[in-house]
Image (cartoon, grey):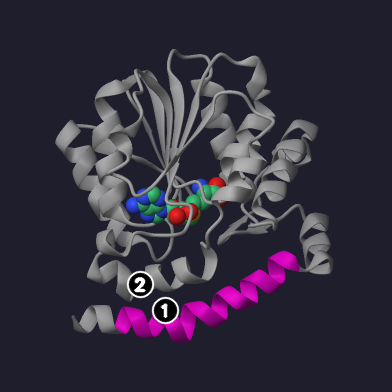
Amino acid sequence: MIKLFFRKLTNQFCFVPLRKILDFVYDNPFIQSLFNVFSLYVEDGLVSIHNHDFTKDPKFKSAYQRGIRANTFDSHWKWRVHVGLWAASHAMQLQGDFVECGVNRGFLSSSIMDYLHWNTLHKKFYLFDTFHGLDRALVSKEEKMLGRMLESEKHYSECYAEVKRNFQGYKNVILVRGSVPSTLKKVFIHRVCYLSIDMNNYASEIAAAEFFWPILVHGAIILLDDYAYKGYLPQKKAFDIFAKKRGITILSLPTGQGMIIKS
Ligand SMILES: C[S@@+](CC[C@H](N)C(=O)[O-])C[C@H]1O[C@@H](n2cnc3c(N)ncnc32)[C@H](O)[C@@H]1O
């Protein structure tokens, strides 16, 4: 309890101002151009001197811009989107459909559809979301202390109508509205090759992973958006237990994501 209290304090008095400073840095074209001169990647809590030429790839740029169009603003997460696009490109070679649990306005899923020329594929993309934020009943006390409900109220407003409009040009996109896990059986999904999980709370995320695990094809990818992300430890702890039960390990990425390939 004391630990949680201090975590909340650090969240409010340390992370919040720090995040504001970082947002200023990410949003400032002059500072970003300075980073470019030194070939530095500085975004989304990640600083890297390593090669990130993917940001200059016209296909990537187009996909990322499509994501921004869906989201209405830039979330400054190019490397995370790069990982998502790689995972989706791998999965499109496999049998089965795409699923995302935690869609919001469709930044990542729109980027993927642009990148893969979705209408040329014979796959379905199932998008599960309440389309109005986290389900309070599923968010643990610890997650509430970490600010999940506050973030939800601030960032995830009602968006179903806009999301429907955003995906209008794409075939075989199925929006499943409501709270996961109760909506998981609303649609029949035979096989899955790509599963993106990004609901910012472990109860619904684990329920989704357990539900889809048996129908993930060999080589299918599970992309966990928050596995190693700063401030989202309850999700990591829960997925480590999920992985241990199945004798697998999760690849922890410097972007804060986690990745599982089902063998
Ligand atoms: C971080 S956002 C997802 C961001 C998204 N992946 C993107 O590309 O922009 C988290 C989303 O999860 C949804 N969500 C959280 N808990 C949920 C639940 N139990 N069932 C359905 N959706 C949920 C929220 O409504 C919110 O849109």
Identify whether 128 is placed above or below 233.
above
Q: Say left or right for 91 vs 203.
A: right
Q: On residue 156, which mark appears?
A: none
* Range drawn in magenta: 6-27
Q: Who's the residue at 60% across and 42% down the image?
A: 164
> In which quadrant of the rendered view does residue 113 lie?
top right
Q: Quadrant of the C terminus?
A: top left
Q: Who's the residue at 31% across and 64% down the image?
A: 136
- Where in the figure is residue 181, as x and y percent of width and height? 28, 44
What's the amino acid at mark 2?
Leu
Q: Say left or right for 259 vs 83.
A: left
- Name the residue nearer the viewer: 130 or 242: 130
Asked if residue 76 lies in the magenta stretch, the reply is no
Q: Are marks 2 and 1 in contact (CB under 8 Å)?
A: yes
- Measure how far apart labels 2 and 1 are at the Cα level: 7 Å
Q: Quadrant of the N terminus?
A: bottom left
Q: Which residue is mark 1?
A: 11
Q: Who's the residue at 51% across and 62% down the image?
A: 156
- Where in the figure is residue 228, as x and y percent of width and height? 40, 54
Q: Say left or right for 173 vs 114.
A: left
Identify whether 81 is placed above or below 199.
above
Q: Who's the residue at 55% across and 78% down the image?
A: 18
Q: Which residue is mark 2?
A: 146
Does residue 226 appear in this view? no
Q: Say left or right for 5 vs 231.
A: left
- Where in the figure is residue 189, as x and y percent of width and height? 36, 23
Crowding near pointer 2: few (<14 within 10 Å), some, many (20+)? many
Which structural element holds mark 1? helix
What's the amino acid at mark 1?
Asn
Which structural element holds mark 2? loop
Does residue 131 appear in this view? yes
> In which quadrant of the rendered view does residue 116 lie?
top right
